[in-house]
Amino acid sequence: MERVDSHLNKKLFVLLFTVLNIVNANLVHKKFEYKYSFKPPYLAQKDGSVPFWEYGGNAIASAENVRIAPSLRSQKGAIWTKTPINFDWWEVDIAFRVTGRGRVGADGLAFWFTQSKGAYDGDVFGSSDMWVGMGLFFDSFDNDGKHNNPYIMAVLNDGTKQFAHQLDGSNQLLSGCLRDFRNKPFPTRAKIEYYQNILTVLFHNGMTNNEQDYEVCLRAENVVLPKNGYFGVSAATGGLADDHDVIHFLTNSLHIPGQVPTVNAVPGEEQQKLTQEYQDYQKKLEQQKAEYRKEHPDEKEPDMDEWFETDNQRELRQIFQGQNNIFQVVRELNAKLDEIVGRQERTMSLISQTAGGVAPPAAPGQAPPPIGDTIRRHEVDAVFNNQKQIINSLGEIRQFVLELVTRSDTIINNQAKQPTAQVQSVGYDTQSLISEMRDGLNHVKQNVAQVAQKIDQSPSGCPSVSCVSVTSVLVIAVVQLLIILGYNIYRDNKENQAKKFY
Ligand SMILES: [Ca+2]
Ligand SMILES: [Ca+2]
Protein backbone atom coordinates (compact mmCIF):
# COMPACT_ATOMS: atom_id res chain seq x y z
CA MET A 1 0.00 0.00 0.00
CA GLU A 2 2.72 2.43 1.04
CA ARG A 3 4.75 1.74 -2.06
CA VAL A 4 1.73 2.29 -4.24
CA ASP A 5 0.94 5.48 -2.34
CA SER A 6 4.39 6.91 -2.88
CA HIS A 7 4.22 5.85 -6.51
CA LEU A 8 0.91 7.63 -6.91
CA ASN A 9 2.28 10.67 -5.13
CA LYS A 10 5.24 10.76 -7.51
CA LYS A 11 2.92 10.46 -10.48
CA LEU A 12 0.74 13.21 -9.08
CA PHE A 13 3.75 15.43 -8.59
CA VAL A 14 4.95 14.90 -12.15
CA LEU A 15 1.43 15.56 -13.43
CA LEU A 16 1.13 18.69 -11.32
CA PHE A 17 4.54 19.82 -12.49
CA THR A 18 3.60 19.25 -16.13
CA VAL A 19 0.39 21.19 -15.65
CA LEU A 20 2.31 24.00 -13.95
CA ASN A 21 4.81 23.97 -16.79
CA ILE A 22 2.06 24.16 -19.36
CA VAL A 23 0.46 27.02 -17.46
CA ASN A 24 3.86 28.71 -17.13
CA ALA A 25 4.67 28.13 -20.78
CA ASN A 26 1.46 29.89 -21.68
CA LEU A 27 2.15 32.81 -19.39
CA VAL A 28 5.92 33.22 -19.43
CA HIS A 29 7.41 35.21 -22.25
CA LYS A 30 10.42 33.34 -23.70
CA LYS A 31 13.16 34.83 -25.81
CA PHE A 32 16.01 32.92 -27.41
CA GLU A 33 19.37 34.39 -26.43
CA TYR A 34 21.80 33.56 -29.24
CA LYS A 35 24.66 35.36 -27.48
CA TYR A 36 24.48 32.84 -24.66
CA SER A 37 24.01 29.79 -26.84
CA PHE A 38 25.93 27.51 -29.16
CA LYS A 39 24.83 24.61 -31.33
CA PRO A 40 25.94 22.59 -34.36
CA PRO A 41 26.49 22.78 -37.26
CA TYR A 42 29.28 25.39 -37.48
CA LEU A 43 29.48 25.46 -33.70
CA ALA A 44 33.13 26.55 -33.88
CA GLN A 45 34.64 28.72 -36.57
CA LYS A 46 37.49 27.56 -38.75
CA ASP A 47 40.00 29.08 -36.33
CA GLY A 48 38.41 27.08 -33.53
CA SER A 49 36.71 29.99 -31.79
CA VAL A 50 33.11 29.78 -30.59
CA PRO A 51 31.22 33.05 -31.16
CA PHE A 52 30.36 34.84 -27.87
CA TRP A 53 32.12 32.17 -25.83
CA GLU A 54 35.65 31.59 -24.65
CA TYR A 55 37.16 28.30 -23.65
CA GLY A 56 40.43 27.08 -22.24
CA GLY A 57 42.35 24.34 -20.49
CA ASN A 58 42.06 21.04 -22.37
CA ALA A 59 38.75 21.96 -24.00
CA ILE A 60 38.55 21.67 -27.80
CA ALA A 61 35.71 23.02 -29.94
CA SER A 62 34.76 21.51 -33.29
CA ALA A 63 31.94 22.19 -35.72
CA GLU A 64 29.83 19.49 -34.00
CA ASN A 65 30.52 19.89 -30.30
CA VAL A 66 32.74 21.21 -27.56
CA ARG A 67 34.92 18.54 -25.96
CA ILE A 68 35.27 20.08 -22.53
CA ALA A 69 37.60 17.35 -21.25
CA PRO A 70 38.92 14.48 -23.39
CA SER A 71 39.32 10.87 -22.23
CA LEU A 72 42.89 11.22 -21.05
CA ARG A 73 44.15 11.23 -17.48
CA SER A 74 43.94 14.41 -15.41
CA GLN A 75 42.41 16.74 -17.98
CA LYS A 76 40.52 19.93 -17.16
CA GLY A 77 38.67 22.37 -19.35
CA ALA A 78 35.86 24.88 -19.40
CA ILE A 79 33.85 27.18 -21.63
CA TRP A 80 32.32 30.48 -20.44
CA THR A 81 30.10 33.17 -21.90
CA LYS A 82 32.10 36.30 -22.72
CA THR A 83 29.59 38.68 -21.23
CA PRO A 84 27.32 38.54 -18.20
CA ILE A 85 23.61 38.00 -18.79
CA ASN A 86 21.24 40.95 -18.95
CA PHE A 87 18.06 39.24 -17.84
CA ASP A 88 16.79 37.98 -14.49
CA TRP A 89 15.19 34.65 -15.26
CA TRP A 90 16.33 32.02 -17.73
CA GLU A 91 16.10 28.49 -19.03
CA VAL A 92 19.14 26.63 -20.34
CA ASP A 93 18.95 23.41 -22.35
CA ILE A 94 22.23 21.52 -22.60
CA ALA A 95 22.74 18.33 -24.59
CA PHE A 96 25.88 16.45 -23.66
CA ARG A 97 27.55 13.08 -23.80
CA VAL A 98 29.75 11.52 -21.15
CA THR A 99 31.32 8.44 -22.70
CA GLY A 100 34.07 6.09 -21.65
CA ARG A 101 35.13 2.50 -22.06
CA GLY A 102 35.13 1.73 -18.35
CA ARG A 103 32.17 0.59 -16.30
CA VAL A 104 33.14 3.51 -14.04
CA GLY A 105 34.21 6.92 -15.30
CA ALA A 106 35.53 10.19 -13.86
CA ASP A 107 35.31 12.92 -12.80
CA GLY A 108 32.31 14.60 -14.32
CA LEU A 109 30.80 17.66 -15.90
CA ALA A 110 29.51 20.88 -14.34
CA PHE A 111 27.09 23.57 -15.46
CA TRP A 112 27.74 26.94 -13.82
CA PHE A 113 25.93 30.16 -13.24
CA THR A 114 28.28 32.36 -11.23
CA GLN A 115 29.02 35.99 -10.49
CA SER A 116 32.33 35.81 -12.33
CA LYS A 117 33.90 33.36 -14.77
CA GLY A 118 35.74 30.45 -13.20
CA ALA A 119 39.19 29.12 -13.98
CA TYR A 120 39.97 26.67 -16.80
CA ASP A 121 41.94 24.33 -14.55
CA GLY A 122 40.14 24.58 -11.21
CA ASP A 123 39.54 21.96 -8.55
CA VAL A 124 35.80 21.52 -8.96
CA PHE A 125 35.13 19.57 -12.15
CA GLY A 126 37.70 21.75 -13.91
CA SER A 127 36.49 25.09 -12.58
CA SER A 128 37.17 27.28 -9.56
CA ASP A 129 36.27 26.40 -6.00
CA MET A 130 34.70 28.97 -3.64
CA TRP A 131 32.40 30.18 -6.38
CA VAL A 132 29.54 32.66 -5.94
CA GLY A 133 26.36 31.27 -7.45
CA MET A 134 25.27 27.83 -8.51
CA GLY A 135 26.99 24.73 -9.86
CA LEU A 136 25.01 21.84 -11.27
CA PHE A 137 27.30 18.82 -11.11
CA PHE A 138 27.10 15.62 -13.11
CA ASP A 139 29.36 13.66 -10.81
CA SER A 140 30.47 10.38 -12.41
CA PHE A 141 32.88 9.10 -9.80
CA ASP A 142 31.86 7.76 -6.39
CA ASN A 143 34.46 9.34 -4.07
CA ASP A 144 32.67 8.52 -0.81
CA GLY A 145 32.00 4.89 -1.77
CA LYS A 146 28.26 5.07 -1.09
CA HIS A 147 27.41 3.54 -4.46
CA ASN A 148 25.35 6.58 -5.33
CA ASN A 149 27.07 7.78 -8.49
CA PRO A 150 26.65 8.93 -11.23
CA TYR A 151 24.72 11.62 -9.39
CA ILE A 152 23.25 14.97 -10.46
CA MET A 153 23.17 17.77 -7.87
CA ALA A 154 22.89 21.49 -7.50
CA VAL A 155 25.27 23.17 -5.05
CA LEU A 156 24.98 26.82 -4.02
CA ASN A 157 27.94 28.76 -2.74
CA ASP A 158 28.44 32.29 -1.45
CA GLY A 159 32.16 32.21 -2.11
CA THR A 160 33.11 30.90 1.33
CA LYS A 161 32.76 27.14 1.06
CA GLN A 162 35.20 24.62 -0.37
CA PHE A 163 33.61 21.76 -2.25
CA ALA A 164 33.81 18.49 -0.28
CA HIS A 165 35.06 16.16 -3.01
CA GLN A 166 35.67 13.27 -0.61
CA LEU A 167 31.98 13.33 0.41
CA ASP A 168 30.79 13.96 -3.17
CA GLY A 169 29.36 17.18 -1.76
CA SER A 170 26.70 15.20 0.11
CA ASN A 171 26.75 17.73 3.00
CA GLN A 172 26.52 20.75 0.71
CA LEU A 173 24.03 19.96 -2.01
CA LEU A 174 20.81 21.90 -2.38
CA SER A 175 19.07 18.96 -4.01
CA GLY A 176 19.85 16.20 -6.47
CA CYS A 177 18.89 12.94 -8.12
CA LEU A 178 20.57 9.62 -8.85
CA ARG A 179 20.68 9.24 -12.64
CA ASP A 180 23.07 7.45 -14.92
CA PHE A 181 24.19 9.78 -17.71
CA ARG A 182 27.20 7.85 -19.08
CA ASN A 183 27.31 5.94 -22.38
CA LYS A 184 23.76 6.52 -23.57
CA PRO A 185 22.61 5.86 -27.16
CA PHE A 186 21.38 9.43 -27.57
CA PRO A 187 22.72 12.63 -25.99
CA THR A 188 21.65 13.16 -22.40
CA ARG A 189 20.01 16.51 -21.77
CA ALA A 190 19.33 18.82 -18.90
CA LYS A 191 16.87 21.68 -18.80
CA ILE A 192 17.79 24.13 -16.05
CA GLU A 193 15.17 26.74 -15.29
CA TYR A 194 15.54 29.67 -12.94
CA TYR A 195 12.31 31.60 -12.72
CA GLN A 196 11.08 33.78 -9.84
CA ASN A 197 13.66 32.26 -7.49
CA ILE A 198 12.57 28.70 -8.25
CA LEU A 199 15.29 26.46 -9.60
CA THR A 200 14.10 23.42 -11.55
CA VAL A 201 16.25 20.81 -13.25
CA LEU A 202 14.71 18.38 -15.72
CA PHE A 203 16.80 15.50 -17.02
CA HIS A 204 16.55 13.46 -20.23
CA ASN A 205 18.33 10.13 -19.83
CA GLY A 206 19.29 9.74 -23.50
CA MET A 207 17.62 6.33 -23.91
CA THR A 208 15.42 7.80 -26.63
CA ASN A 209 15.53 10.84 -28.87
CA ASN A 210 11.99 11.72 -27.83
CA GLU A 211 11.61 15.37 -26.85
CA GLN A 212 8.97 14.45 -24.27
CA ASP A 213 11.14 12.22 -22.10
CA TYR A 214 12.31 14.77 -19.54
CA GLU A 215 11.96 13.86 -15.89
CA VAL A 216 12.09 16.11 -12.86
CA CYS A 217 15.47 15.78 -11.19
CA LEU A 218 15.21 18.55 -8.65
CA ARG A 219 13.17 21.59 -7.70
CA ALA A 220 14.10 24.18 -5.09
CA GLU A 221 12.33 27.34 -4.01
CA ASN A 222 13.70 30.59 -2.62
CA VAL A 223 16.95 30.24 -4.55
CA VAL A 224 18.83 33.50 -4.88
CA LEU A 225 21.45 33.60 -7.63
CA PRO A 226 23.71 36.53 -8.50
CA LYS A 227 22.37 39.17 -10.83
CA ASN A 228 24.09 39.40 -14.21
CA GLY A 229 26.21 36.30 -13.82
CA TYR A 230 28.03 34.15 -16.37
CA PHE A 231 27.10 30.76 -17.80
CA GLY A 232 29.80 28.12 -18.06
CA VAL A 233 30.43 24.43 -18.49
CA SER A 234 33.50 22.69 -17.17
CA ALA A 235 34.72 19.11 -16.90
CA ALA A 236 37.60 17.12 -15.51
CA THR A 237 39.07 13.62 -15.63
CA GLY A 238 41.16 11.85 -13.03
CA GLY A 239 42.83 8.45 -12.95
CA LEU A 240 39.78 7.26 -14.91
CA ALA A 241 38.80 9.31 -17.91
CA ASP A 242 35.63 9.88 -19.90
CA ASP A 243 35.07 12.11 -22.90
CA HIS A 244 32.91 15.07 -21.87
CA ASP A 245 31.22 16.57 -24.91
CA VAL A 246 28.61 19.34 -24.98
CA ILE A 247 26.56 19.25 -28.17
CA HIS A 248 24.44 22.29 -27.62
CA PHE A 249 23.84 25.02 -25.08
CA LEU A 250 20.59 26.88 -25.70
CA THR A 251 19.55 29.79 -23.52
CA ASN A 252 16.14 31.41 -23.34
CA SER A 253 15.46 34.42 -21.19
CA LEU A 254 12.15 34.25 -19.31
CA HIS A 255 10.05 37.30 -18.69
CA ILE A 256 7.13 37.77 -16.37
CA PRO A 257 4.02 38.51 -18.48
CA GLY A 258 3.25 42.22 -18.59
CA GLN A 259 6.84 43.20 -17.91
CA VAL A 260 8.66 44.52 -20.93
CA PRO A 261 11.86 42.58 -21.68
CA THR A 262 14.81 44.73 -20.67
CA VAL A 263 16.35 44.95 -24.13
CA ASN A 264 18.63 47.85 -23.43
CA ALA A 265 19.85 46.76 -20.02
CA VAL A 266 23.37 46.37 -21.41
CA PRO A 267 25.27 49.62 -21.43
CA GLY A 268 25.38 51.27 -24.85
CA GLU A 269 29.12 50.76 -25.14
CA GLU A 270 28.87 47.04 -24.37
CA GLN A 271 26.00 46.70 -26.81
CA GLN A 272 28.00 48.37 -29.55
CA LYS A 273 30.99 46.13 -28.84
CA LEU A 274 28.84 42.99 -29.09
CA THR A 275 27.23 44.11 -32.32
CA GLN A 276 30.65 44.93 -33.75
CA GLU A 277 31.90 41.49 -32.68
CA TYR A 278 28.92 39.83 -34.31
CA GLN A 279 29.48 41.72 -37.57
CA ASP A 280 33.18 40.80 -37.48
CA TYR A 281 32.27 37.15 -37.15
CA GLN A 282 29.86 37.39 -40.05
CA LYS A 283 32.54 39.03 -42.20
CA LYS A 284 35.10 36.41 -41.20
CA LEU A 285 32.67 33.62 -42.05
CA GLU A 286 31.99 35.10 -45.49
CA GLN A 287 35.72 35.49 -46.11
CA GLN A 288 36.38 31.90 -45.12
CA LYS A 289 33.61 30.73 -47.40
CA ALA A 290 35.05 32.73 -50.30
CA GLU A 291 38.54 31.37 -49.65
CA TYR A 292 37.25 27.86 -49.54
CA ARG A 293 35.48 28.30 -52.86
CA LYS A 294 38.68 29.71 -54.36
CA GLU A 295 40.73 26.78 -53.10
CA HIS A 296 38.19 24.18 -54.27
CA PRO A 297 36.73 25.58 -57.48
CA ASP A 298 35.59 22.11 -58.67
CA GLU A 299 33.65 21.31 -55.55
CA LYS A 300 30.11 22.59 -55.83
CA GLU A 301 28.25 20.88 -53.04
CA PRO A 302 29.23 18.67 -50.13
CA ASP A 303 30.01 15.10 -51.11
CA MET A 304 26.81 13.21 -51.88
CA ASP A 305 28.09 10.21 -49.91
CA GLU A 306 27.29 12.14 -46.76
CA TRP A 307 23.62 11.90 -47.66
CA PHE A 308 23.73 8.13 -47.51
CA GLU A 309 24.39 5.98 -44.50
CA THR A 310 26.61 2.92 -44.33
CA ASP A 311 25.24 -0.54 -43.55
CA ASN A 312 26.47 -0.27 -39.97
CA GLN A 313 24.86 3.11 -39.49
CA ARG A 314 21.60 1.84 -40.86
CA GLU A 315 21.70 -1.22 -38.65
CA LEU A 316 22.45 0.90 -35.63
CA ARG A 317 19.67 3.31 -36.50
CA GLN A 318 17.23 0.43 -36.91
CA ILE A 319 18.27 -0.99 -33.56
CA PHE A 320 17.70 2.36 -31.90
CA GLN A 321 14.35 2.72 -33.59
CA GLY A 322 13.37 -0.75 -32.43
CA GLN A 323 14.45 0.10 -28.91
CA ASN A 324 12.47 3.30 -29.11
CA ASN A 325 9.38 1.37 -30.10
CA ILE A 326 9.93 -1.16 -27.31
CA PHE A 327 10.35 1.69 -24.89
CA GLN A 328 7.09 3.25 -26.03
CA VAL A 329 5.22 -0.03 -25.61
CA VAL A 330 6.72 -0.58 -22.17
CA ARG A 331 5.67 2.91 -21.20
CA GLU A 332 2.13 2.31 -22.37
CA LEU A 333 2.06 -0.98 -20.47
CA ASN A 334 3.32 0.80 -17.42
CA ALA A 335 0.54 3.36 -17.70
CA LYS A 336 -2.05 0.61 -18.06
CA LEU A 337 -0.62 -1.25 -15.09
CA ASP A 338 -0.86 1.92 -13.05
CA GLU A 339 -4.47 2.26 -14.09
CA ILE A 340 -5.20 -1.32 -13.03
CA VAL A 341 -3.44 -0.82 -9.71
CA GLY A 342 -5.52 2.30 -9.22
CA ARG A 343 -8.73 0.47 -9.92
CA GLN A 344 -7.75 -2.36 -7.59
CA GLU A 345 -6.98 0.16 -4.87
CA ARG A 346 -10.40 1.74 -5.33
CA THR A 347 -12.12 -1.62 -5.17
CA MET A 348 -10.16 -2.63 -2.07
CA SER A 349 -11.02 0.60 -0.32
CA LEU A 350 -14.71 0.15 -1.22
CA ILE A 351 -14.68 -3.40 0.19
CA SER A 352 -12.92 -2.34 3.37
CA GLN A 353 -15.36 0.56 3.77
CA THR A 354 -18.31 -1.80 3.47
CA ALA A 355 -16.73 -4.33 5.84
CA GLY A 356 -15.86 -1.63 8.37
CA GLY A 357 -19.32 -0.04 8.24
CA VAL A 358 -21.45 -3.01 9.53
CA ALA A 359 -21.96 -4.75 12.86
CA PRO A 360 -20.10 -8.03 13.72
CA PRO A 361 -21.35 -11.06 11.77
CA ALA A 362 -24.62 -12.62 12.93
CA ALA A 363 -24.67 -15.80 15.06
CA PRO A 364 -24.97 -19.13 13.17
CA GLY A 365 -28.47 -19.94 12.08
CA GLN A 366 -29.54 -16.34 12.42
CA ALA A 367 -30.10 -14.42 9.23
CA PRO A 368 -27.59 -11.60 8.77
CA PRO A 369 -29.06 -8.12 8.76
CA PRO A 370 -29.88 -7.06 5.20
CA ILE A 371 -27.54 -4.35 3.80
CA GLY A 372 -28.79 -3.70 0.32
CA ASP A 373 -27.19 -5.71 -2.46
CA THR A 374 -23.62 -5.76 -1.19
CA ILE A 375 -21.87 -9.03 -0.32
CA ARG A 376 -19.68 -9.06 2.71
CA ARG A 377 -16.26 -10.61 2.98
CA HIS A 378 -17.12 -13.50 5.34
CA GLU A 379 -20.11 -14.42 3.17
CA VAL A 380 -17.88 -14.66 0.15
CA ASP A 381 -15.42 -16.79 2.16
CA ALA A 382 -18.24 -19.10 3.33
CA VAL A 383 -19.43 -19.59 -0.22
CA PHE A 384 -15.91 -20.39 -1.34
CA ASN A 385 -15.45 -22.91 1.48
CA ASN A 386 -18.73 -24.61 0.63
CA GLN A 387 -17.76 -24.85 -3.00
CA LYS A 388 -14.46 -26.42 -2.05
CA GLN A 389 -16.08 -29.01 0.23
CA ILE A 390 -18.63 -29.91 -2.43
CA ILE A 391 -15.95 -30.35 -5.05
CA ASN A 392 -13.95 -32.60 -2.72
CA SER A 393 -16.97 -34.75 -1.93
CA LEU A 394 -17.83 -35.00 -5.62
CA GLY A 395 -14.32 -36.18 -6.31
CA GLU A 396 -14.68 -38.91 -3.71
CA ILE A 397 -18.01 -40.02 -5.15
CA ARG A 398 -16.60 -40.11 -8.62
CA GLN A 399 -13.74 -42.30 -7.46
CA PHE A 400 -16.16 -44.75 -5.89
CA VAL A 401 -18.22 -44.95 -9.04
CA LEU A 402 -15.13 -45.54 -11.12
CA GLU A 403 -13.95 -48.21 -8.75
CA LEU A 404 -17.31 -49.91 -9.00
CA VAL A 405 -17.21 -49.83 -12.78
CA THR A 406 -13.72 -51.32 -12.92
CA ARG A 407 -14.63 -54.01 -10.45
CA SER A 408 -17.70 -55.00 -12.39
CA ASP A 409 -15.63 -55.00 -15.59
CA THR A 410 -13.05 -57.34 -14.06
CA ILE A 411 -15.79 -59.65 -12.94
CA ILE A 412 -17.30 -59.70 -16.43
CA ASN A 413 -13.90 -60.37 -17.94
CA ASN A 414 -13.25 -63.20 -15.54
CA GLN A 415 -16.51 -64.73 -16.54
CA ALA A 416 -15.72 -64.35 -20.23
CA LYS A 417 -12.45 -66.21 -19.72
CA GLN A 418 -14.24 -69.14 -18.13
CA PRO A 419 -16.99 -70.11 -20.57
CA THR A 420 -17.23 -73.58 -19.04
CA ALA A 421 -17.75 -72.26 -15.57
CA GLN A 422 -20.58 -73.86 -13.68
CA VAL A 423 -23.81 -72.16 -12.95
CA GLN A 424 -22.98 -72.23 -9.26
CA SER A 425 -19.82 -70.19 -9.66
CA VAL A 426 -21.62 -67.67 -11.80
CA GLY A 427 -24.18 -67.41 -9.10
CA TYR A 428 -21.42 -66.82 -6.58
CA ASP A 429 -19.94 -64.03 -8.76
CA THR A 430 -23.30 -62.36 -9.08
CA GLN A 431 -23.73 -62.53 -5.33
CA SER A 432 -20.31 -61.02 -4.64
CA LEU A 433 -20.95 -58.37 -7.27
CA ILE A 434 -24.24 -57.47 -5.66
CA SER A 435 -22.66 -57.30 -2.22
CA GLU A 436 -19.83 -55.13 -3.55
CA MET A 437 -22.32 -52.85 -5.19
CA ARG A 438 -24.30 -52.65 -1.98
CA ASP A 439 -21.09 -51.74 -0.20
CA GLY A 440 -20.40 -49.06 -2.78
CA LEU A 441 -23.89 -47.69 -2.49
CA ASN A 442 -23.45 -47.48 1.27
CA HIS A 443 -20.28 -45.44 0.76
CA VAL A 444 -22.11 -43.13 -1.60
CA LYS A 445 -24.90 -42.74 0.93
CA GLN A 446 -22.40 -41.89 3.67
CA ASN A 447 -20.74 -39.29 1.45
CA VAL A 448 -24.02 -37.73 0.59
CA ALA A 449 -24.87 -37.54 4.28
CA GLN A 450 -21.49 -35.91 4.99
CA VAL A 451 -21.98 -33.32 2.29
CA ALA A 452 -25.47 -32.56 3.51
CA GLN A 453 -24.13 -32.19 7.04
CA LYS A 454 -21.37 -29.83 5.92
CA ILE A 455 -23.77 -27.71 3.98
CA ASP A 456 -26.07 -27.48 6.99
CA GLN A 457 -23.16 -26.51 9.25
CA SER A 458 -21.97 -23.58 7.15
CA PRO A 459 -23.29 -20.30 8.59
CA SER A 460 -24.60 -18.54 5.53
CA GLY A 461 -25.74 -21.52 3.51
CA CYS A 462 -24.61 -22.07 -0.01
CA PRO A 463 -25.75 -20.48 -3.21
CA SER A 464 -28.81 -22.23 -4.57
CA VAL A 465 -27.21 -22.93 -7.93
CA SER A 466 -24.48 -25.06 -6.33
CA CYS A 467 -26.95 -27.02 -4.19
CA VAL A 468 -29.09 -27.91 -7.16
CA SER A 469 -26.09 -29.08 -9.09
CA VAL A 470 -24.93 -31.30 -6.20
CA THR A 471 -28.31 -32.95 -5.88
CA SER A 472 -28.54 -33.57 -9.58
CA VAL A 473 -25.03 -35.02 -9.64
CA LEU A 474 -25.91 -37.36 -6.80
CA VAL A 475 -29.08 -38.45 -8.53
CA ILE A 476 -27.18 -39.10 -11.73
CA ALA A 477 -24.58 -41.13 -9.82
CA VAL A 478 -27.26 -43.31 -8.22
CA VAL A 479 -29.07 -43.76 -11.54
CA GLN A 480 -25.78 -44.77 -13.13
CA LEU A 481 -25.18 -47.31 -10.40
CA LEU A 482 -28.63 -48.78 -10.89
CA ILE A 483 -28.12 -48.98 -14.65
CA ILE A 484 -24.79 -50.75 -14.24
CA LEU A 485 -26.34 -53.12 -11.73
CA GLY A 486 -29.29 -53.81 -14.00
CA TYR A 487 -27.04 -54.26 -17.02
CA ASN A 488 -24.80 -56.71 -15.18
CA ILE A 489 -27.71 -58.79 -13.99
CA TYR A 490 -29.24 -58.73 -17.48
CA ARG A 491 -25.92 -59.77 -19.02
CA ASP A 492 -25.35 -62.55 -16.52
CA ASN A 493 -28.81 -63.89 -17.23
CA LYS A 494 -28.22 -63.75 -20.96
CA GLU A 495 -24.91 -65.59 -20.60
CA ASN A 496 -26.52 -68.21 -18.46
CA GLN A 497 -29.22 -68.68 -21.07
CA ALA A 498 -26.56 -68.89 -23.78
CA LYS A 499 -24.70 -71.54 -21.82
CA LYS A 500 -27.78 -73.68 -21.71
CA PHE A 501 -27.52 -74.13 -25.48
CA TYR A 502 -24.05 -75.72 -25.28
CA1 LIG B 1 32.61 12.49 -7.17
CA1 LIG C 1 29.04 9.09 -3.91
Image: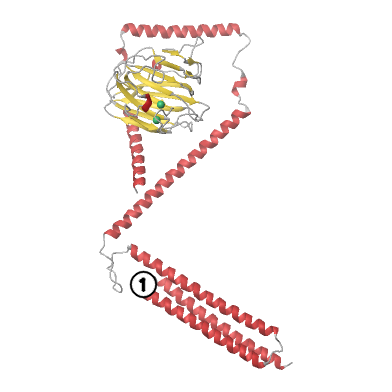
Taking the image as four quarters, which one is ligand 1 found in? top left
Q: Visible in this render: residue 402? A: yes
Q: Is mark 1 within 8 Å of ligand 2?
A: no
Q: Is residue 11 above or below residue 314?
A: below
Q: Residue at x 33, y 57 (%)?
A: 351
Residue at the image point whose x is 51% and y is 39% from the top: 326
Residue 375 visible in the displayed image: no
Residue 493 horizontal side relative to residue 469, left or right: right
Q: In this view of the protein, which residue sits in the foreground, 403 or 202?
A: 403
Q: Position of residue 237 (x, y in %)?
A: 46, 21
- On the image, numbered disc 1 is attached to which residue? 458
| Vertical comparison of 80 with 443: above or below | above
Left or right: where 401 falls relative to 381: right
Q: Circle 1: is it few (<14), some (14-19), or many (20+) Cα within 10 Å?
A: some
x, y percent for residue 16: 33, 37
Where is residue 132? Give x, y as percent: 31, 18
In the image, is residue 35 above or below residue 468? above
- Amino acid bearing label 1: Ser
